[in-house]
Amino acid sequence: MSTRADELINEYLDRLEEGLADFPPTRRRELVQEISAHIAEARASLENEDEASIRNLLDRIGDPADIAAEAAGPPAPEAPLPPPPAKTRGGGWDVAALVMLLVGGLIVPVIGWFIGLALLWTSETWSTGEKLLGTLLVPGGLALPLFLLTIGTSVNSCGGPVGGPITCTGGNGVGSAAAAVLVIALLVVPIAVVAYLARRRSQVAAPA
């Protein structure tokens, strides 16, 4: 038996064991013994056991790293990454948007409602349709109907001489009734829309 041949085979088997380092010990021994037996069988059939013949024999068996990789099987598929969490601003952002939409015009005349509008459109809680609803159906919030109510009160004034008949100036009954309906609608609709947006926010924020 060639000493150099034994060295080459031992080096080969050592490399194979290194490639199988992650395998359980029992499985690693089985694979090394299997390849060692295959080498011994092929070696016995050699006519001339020189270094070149042993190297060719080992090359035909394959690189130890390739044998280890084949024994390990295909890599397990990577688990899909979880979807990124929805981007949401803090709850205070949405609450501020609703408050300013409704009474911002009373807190900061005129500008307050526009601040609420800006907060509404920069929020990531509501859909575009819901934002349009808040924009078109809450014009000025409660500031607008209260302003109209103040104007109507100042226009419909009553007076007269002391002891004489009292006369009132202003629109006729039909006009006053229509104005009253308009003011009530302008009061009720913003409140209803803001309540709807608040409910939608709670539904979006609720855990699945």
Image (cartoon, helix red, strand yellow):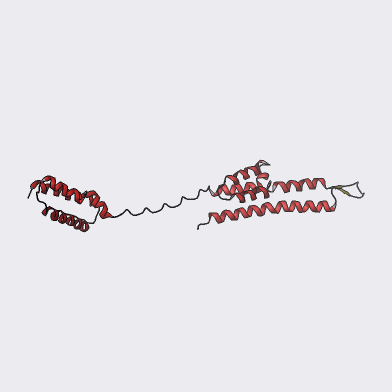
- Please name the residue shown 75% across and 52% down the image: 182
In percent of width and height, residue 33 lies at 17, 56
Q: Residue furthest right?
A: 164
Query: Closest to the observer: 173 or 20?
Result: 20
Could you tell me residue 113's position as x and y percent? 65, 44
Question: Is residue 95 at all visible to an observer of this figure?
Answer: yes
Q: What's the residue at 57%, 49% (across, down)?
A: 94
Residue name at image x 84 percent, y 53 percent: 173
Q: Is residue 34 left or right of residue 70?
A: left
Residue 21 shows in the view = no
Q: In this view, does 17 lie to the left or right of 185?
A: left
Q: Quarter of the image holding residue 35?
A: bottom left
Given residues 63 and 44, the one toward you in this image is: 44
Please tell me which residue lies in front, 29 or 192.
29
Q: Residue furthest top?
A: 111
| Residue 2 spot, x, y in % from top left | 8, 48
| x, y percent for residue 194 | 64, 52
Judged from this view, the residue extending furthest toward the left is 1
Q: How many marks?
A: 0
| Relative horizontal placement of residue 184, taking residue 53 as reference (left or right) | right
